[in-house]
Image: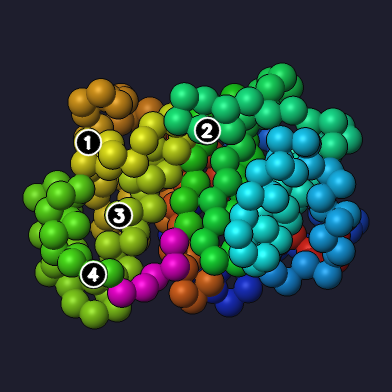
Amino acid sequence: MAEGYRDLSDGRWGVENDDALIDGRLPATEIHIWQASLDGSSVPLQQFAALLSIDEQQRAQRFRFAQHHRRYVVSRGILRMLLGDYLKTSPAALEFCYGHNGKPALAIATAGLVFNVSHSEDLMLCAIARHCEVGIDLEFVRPVEHLDRLTQRFFSAREHAAIHQLSGEQQLQRFFQHWTCKEALLKAIGAQLTSLSTIEVGISDHTATVVSWGCATAQPVQQWSLQLFMPSSQTVAAVAVNAPARGCVFRLWPVDCL
């Protein structure tokens, strides 16, 4: 992509006001990345729930814990509002379809709009673009049990060595940088996470590139680009797109927006 590593942990997420929220314009040269707090919204839950389809409402009822139920309803409501604003369509009228491995898409492709969503704890990221494949992944940086065994299984020898030459927080951050890049790539094409080991990512100075992508999910690596960024001081994220010349525009969803 056209931009380098972005540390957004100091809150530089761009606009947070209704006038500048969405102007409906999404140039083919941009990816819009939205961050939302799923626990911090001041909007009553039932107002988000009213936007959901019957299938979504039924899925929401299957969550055992109230927190998980709320986060699902809020995330689907925000997604619908975002896409509805870009498409100038009622959020409740949007219909989704799902690929073989559950990748969501708009049932009726309009103006080439594509999206991908990731959640971790109470944070949600949504990447929106046009006329490409896009994937996004978000992870909280946290201790990982059996890290050595995990990297040997899912990472190349070079990735394994690059991670284990570091220690402490630097090692964990580098591990999750590799992980989010791989998962973002797989989410972009709707592939299963069992294919993580087929991808090799190189990271230097927080800049990521696709080194190889083989086996059943083989992709021409020159068509793909990655961007790493830090949504907060405790998280790492990556966005993958099969259109190299795309700049990322970061935006924050207002907590009181509906």
Give the quarter of the image for residue 40. Answer: bottom right
- In contact (CB < 8 Å): disc 3 and disc 4: no
Task: Identify residue for label 1.
Answer: 198
Q: Could you tell me the amino acid type at mark 4?
A: Glu
Tell me if residue 228 is in the magenta stretch: no
Q: Could you tell me the amino acid type at mark 3?
A: His
Where residue 208 appears, as percent x and y from the top left, is 33, 50
**Which label sits in the foreground, 1 or 3?**
1
Task: Identify residue for label 2.
Answer: 103
Q: Residue at x 26, y 46 (%)?
A: 201
- Could you tell me how many numbered marks the image carries? 4
Mark 4 vs 1, N-terminal side: 4
Mark 1 vs 3, N-terminal side: 3
Give the quarter of the image for residue 183. Answer: top left
Q: Nearer the viewer, residue 223 or 197?
A: 197
Farthest residue to the bottom: give it: 168
Q: Secondary structure at mark 1?
A: helix
Q: Secondary structure at mark 3?
A: helix
Disc number placed over residue 178 in the picture, else none:
3
Q: Could you tell me the amino acid type at mark 1?
A: Thr
Task: Identify residue for label 4.
Answer: 145
Magenta part of the protein: which range? 139-143
